[in-house]
Image (spheres, grey):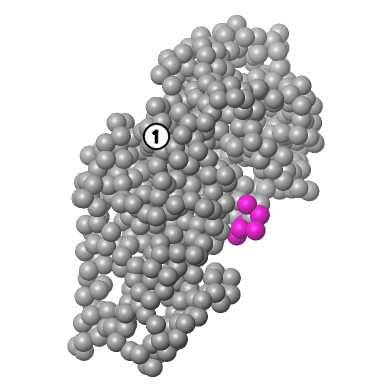
Amino acid sequence: MNCKSILILLFLINSYIVKAQNTVGTISLTENAFEGYTLLTLHTKTYLIDNCGKLINEWSSSFPPGNAVYLLENGNLLRAGRTPSTDITFGGQGGIIELYNWDGDLIWSYLYDTPLHRQHHDIFPMPNGNVLILAAEVMTESEAIQAGRNPALLIENRLFNEQVIEVEPVGANDGNIVWEWNFKDHLIQDFDNTKDNFGDIANNPQLLDINFLNGGNGNANWIHMNSVQYNADLDQIILSGRALSEIFIIDHSTTTIQAASNSGGIYGKGGDLLYRWGNPQSYKQGTEANRQLYGQHFPHWIPSGFEDGGKIILFNNGDRRTPEFSEVYTLELPESSPGIYEYVNGSSFGPIAPDYIYSDENRFYSRIVSSAQRLPNGNTLICAGFKGDIFEIDNQENIVWEYVSPVNNNNGNIATQGDETTSFINITFRALKYAVDYPAFVGKDLSPGDPIELDFNTDVCDNVGVSDEEFIGFKIYPNPTTNELFIKTNDTILKIDIYNALGSLILSNKGIDYFQLKHLNSGIYFIRIQTNEKKYIRKIIKY
């Protein structure tokens, strides 16, 4: 075996050992991973990390997650927190919305937590600066029965109406509710013709059957919404009802009064459901055999311009099916025109099946929480949140990055590298990745700190992109870098060119082995080095 082969073999062995040793933080990383920063909220802190798991920024709150978090384009952080209230309680409870600046200062908060209503699971930052809030509202026993609920299916003597409100921030801790939509305004039942909402369920798919429980036992939290997302181009909202295993689309272009009416629906704009999918037995247009969703999370529109732009992507948890395994779906919705969904009377909403399914029964399963996000380069970021496992696949379904949360979400304790994840609860609601050129990062100090975990090991990251030639006598370091870049080679350097991600030449020098990059914006660049022996092209990352 020649020297070059020995070096390659040693590199492969070293890569395997490093991967085997890492149990938390960055487990694996390849050059095909999308360059960006991943946002996670765990216990009372929110972390922004790079692909190496190194900390870029951190925000602290007095509240554990409640559960969603977003990094806004201006660098502010919008986060839901969980209040200690005991009036309305179930998994995903929240109660307060907080807005922090990049430096971690609290600049606005809004409490939506009373004995009668409480924010939970998700919020969404609107383009106009307002905030959509997903909330549960108490319906009394008498109100639920009057709405058509079968008393035998009312075991907690109350029922939760799910609502979406839009709040305009006011001052430091107040807000105006400028729009509202409620499920209680769009119900149907065929149980009691002396009560409200009596009708033919099969012929009214734009309404929700108040007595369909999808195998549930009749507790107050019968819908269990876990996601609210918005499409500005369509002015529509998509909701996820985990307990019913359905997703719903509603119109946001209405007034609050119109949103409460039962006009429009699937036949046009209005307050009723525009679209639903996942479990057609809920409106008596199918059976359990036609069901396709099982406790899903985070349905949202893929941004236009991305691969599969305009389609819906979601994480299908696979809860309570046999066998239990999770999947990522993309759906192409049946539209006659943008935002108008085709429906044939006496049938179920299409599509018959997802147009894409990513599934690996041996790779990931998360009974609750979780998310999937299409990235600008076509990769997909997947958060199998029950075990805090976040991984990215390319369009060939190769895993190009994997990260395991080292934070105990129950108490905030940080794991030590080498700890097994079975020894702590690292449940993670959602993971979102932002490109390095996202507007929030302009003018910010993005110098990476240490990884979150204790006794960290960054060898996985340090070896990314290292080839057999680099072990023999060629190296670019540090990469990623903040300011300086050094080139080490046994050959004679003739010329070095640096290009931006668009292919434009931005720097060129002859015969040097050092660059000062402080004046360059954060992002991805490519360096081409011509020596007397060969030509090298490498990707570099500037923080």
Q: Nearer the viewer, residue 183 or 342?
A: 183
Would residue 112 be seen by someone viewing this image from the given angle? yes
Q: Nearer the viewer, residue 48 or 481?
A: 481
The image position of residue 499, as x and y in percent, is 52, 74
Name the residue carrying label 1: 60
Q: Nearer the viewer, residue 482 or 133?
A: 482
Number of marks in the rendered image = 1
Figure check: 83 above or below 527 = above
| Quarter occupied by the C terminus | bottom left
Query: Dot 1 surroundings within 10 Å: few (below 14), some, or many (20 or more)?
Result: some
> Can you name the residue that lies furthest to the top here?
142
Q: Is residue 375 left or right of residue 367?
A: right
Q: Which residue appears at 27% of the width and 62% of the height?
A: 459
The image position of residue 173, as x and y in percent, is 55, 23
> Can you name the residue that lies furthest to the bottom here?
532
Q: Nearer the viewer, residue 190 or 22?
A: 22
Residue 59 lies in quadrant: top left
Q: Which residue appears at 22% of the width and 39% of the height?
A: 423
Report the amino acid beneath label 1. Answer: Ser
- Based on the picture, tell me whether residue 41 belongs to the magenta stretch: no
Would residue 159 be seen by someone viewing this image from the given angle? no
Q: Which residue appears at 41% of the width and 67% of the height?
A: 31
Figure check: 396 above or below 59 = below
Magenta stretch?
Answer: 303-308
Q: Is residue 453 left or right of residue 50?
A: left
The image position of residue 513, as x and y in percent, is 37, 80
Main SS, magenta region, reads loop
